[in-house]
Image (tube, helix red, strand yellow):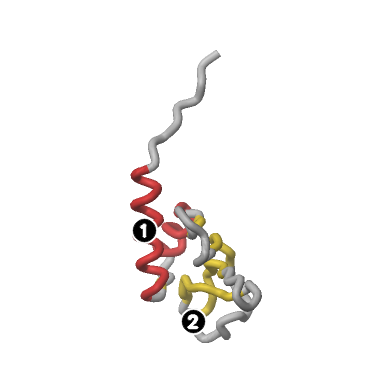
Amino acid sequence: MALKIRLTKVGAVHQSLYRVVVAEARSRRDGAAVENLGTYRPGDKGSPIKVNLERVEYWLSKGALPTNTMHAMIKKARRAAAAKPEVPAASA
């Protein structure tokens, strides 16, 4: 079973919303997904992609291949996560 990390469209016309999913390579674009990893809103300013990078790493380690578009988006999400400073917990 070959798995792909790809986008699935769920938004309305002119209100695009995509889910980042792991799905079998032979399934339809909007077909059944193995797991939902996050969302992508192309119209949002700032950070349009929200993705669980831990789960992305897990699926990549299991052999799932991202599409070209998702490969670029994962790189951007990793850069954004690395640039975001960690907020330490306030001590009482």
Q: Is residue 22 above or below residue 87?
A: below
Rendered position, 54 above or below 33:
above
Residue 63 occupies which quadrant of the picture? Answer: bottom left
Q: Residue type at mark 2: give it.
A: Ala
Residue 28 locus on image (x, y percent): 57, 85
- Across the whole image, how many numbered discs are drawn on residues? 2
Quarter of the picture containing the C terminus is top right
Left or right for 44, reference 62: right
On the image, numbered disc 1 is attached to which residue?
A: 76
Residue at x 53% of width, y 78% of height: 24
- Residue 35 appears in which quarter of the rendering? bottom right
Instruction: Report, in whole angstroms, how far the alpha carbon at label 2 lies from the one at label 1.
Output: 23 Å
Label 2 or label 1, whichever lies nearer to me, is 1
Give the vertical position of 49 relative to 33 (above or below). Answer: above
Asked whether disc 2 touches disc 1, contact meaning CB atoms under 8 Å apart, the reply is no
| Residue positioned most to the right | 12
- Label 2: element kind: loop
Name the spot of residue 87 as percent of width and height, x first: 45, 31
- Determine the residue located farthest toward the top in the rendered image: 92
- What amino acid does circle 1 point to? Lys
Residue located at (52% from left, 67% from top): 20
Q: Who is closer to the viewer here, 40 or 55? A: 40
Residue 37 % position (x, y): 54, 61
Residue 51: x, y in percent? 50, 57
Measured along the vertical axis of the image, is residue 80 above or below residue 11?
Answer: above
- In the image, 64 versus 67, the foreground residue is 67
Q: Foreground residue, 45 or 82? A: 45
Q: Which mark is residue 25?
A: 2
Mark 2 is surrounded, within 10 Å at the Cα level, by few (under 14), some (14 to 19) or many (20 or more) other residues, namely: some
Residue at (50, 25) in percent of width and height: 89
> Helix, strand or loop at disc 1?
helix
